[in-house]
Structures are given as C-alpha cells and as structure tokens.
Amino acid sequence: MIDNKATWEQVQIMLQAWQQDPMNMKQTFIDYAEWLAAQEGVRLEYKARPGVSYSLRATHANQSTRPLFVLVDIVDDEPEARWLSVCFYADMVNDPEELGDFVPQGLMGEDACCLNLDEDNNDLRAYVRARIEEAAAAAR
C-alpha cells in the first residue's frame, strides 16, 4: 500500500502530467506500482525530484535493516522520453541474463543491481518484473 492518501495523490498528479511517452514507460511504471501496492506487508513511499527523477520506494514490514527492497525511478532528464531505472540490493536478486549494471555502493551505500528500461521492450519489462518479484520474496 502507498503510505498515505496524499502520497498516492502526488503520484496521480505526476502521472496525469506525463503526456509524452513514446517508449510506453508510464504504463510500465503503473503496472509495477500496482503490483507492489497489492503485496501484503509492502509499503510504498514516493519522492519527486522534477527534472531529475520520480522515485517509488518499496519496503516490506519484515525488513529491519534496510529502508527498501526496490527503487523504481522514472528518470526525468528528458521529459519527452522518460525511462525507468529499477534498482535492488545486489544480494537480493539474481541477474541471470546479466542485463543489469552492478553499482558498487549504489543503493543507500550498499552494492546494487540496476536495470534500465530505456526502450520499448516487453521482454525486458517482464525480466525486470521477475526481479521485482524476486526482491519482494527476499524481503519477506
């Protein structure tokens, strides 16, 4: 669930303002957010940094040492062609096809695996979704 009504309203305002979407990232973001929001024990936080990113951070109630298990960023450096960067703690997911970038200390000071959706690619969307599900299971 999203932590509070005001947060969900902020997400909705951002989504309504997102008009140009040649790579279909808006619906991908919505799909990931709705799946995360439907998971038992998962809480979502939203942080807007217009011109930089819009971040959705998911944490599970069972997590006590980490503030999230996935960070879904809408990268806003080119508003007419926004893309998604989905980051995980490197030890919470596998990347069997090695499509992600390993980022030393890249997520809250810990090693990260980040997958970028910067093209209209259904196989990549499904691959990232599987990693989100994997991270959610690890967080439980």
Image (tube, rainbow, N blue to C red):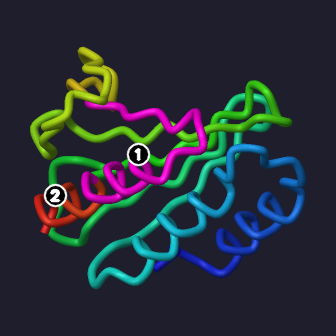
Q: Please state, as top left, top right, bottom left or bottom right, where the C terminus lies in the image.
A: bottom left
Q: Which mark is residue 64?
A: 2
Q: Which mark is residue 17?
A: none
What's drawn in magenta, residue-wise?
A: 113-131
Neighbour tally class for label 1: few under 14, some 14-19, many 20 plus, Cα within 10 Å: some
Query: Which label lies toward us, 2 or 1?
Result: 1
Amino acid type, callout 1: Leu
Rendered location of residue 62, percent (x, y) = 15, 69
- Does the magenta segment cover residue 128? yes
Which is more toward the observer, 54 or 25?
A: 25
Dot 2: element: loop
Residue 139 falls in which quadrant of the image? bottom left
Q: How far apart are marks 2 and 1 (CA)?
A: 31 Å
Amino acid type, callout 2: Ser
Rendered location of residue 101, percent (x, y) = 31, 22
Which is more toward the observer, 8 or 125?
A: 125
Q: Which mark is residue 124?
A: 1
Dot 1: element: helix
Choose the circle earlier in sequence order: 2 or 1: 2
Residue 98 lies left or right of residue 85; in this view the side is left
Residue 68 lies left or right of residue 82; in this view the side is left
Residue appearing at x 86%, y 65% in the figure:
16
Residue appearing at x 11%, y 59% in the figure:
138
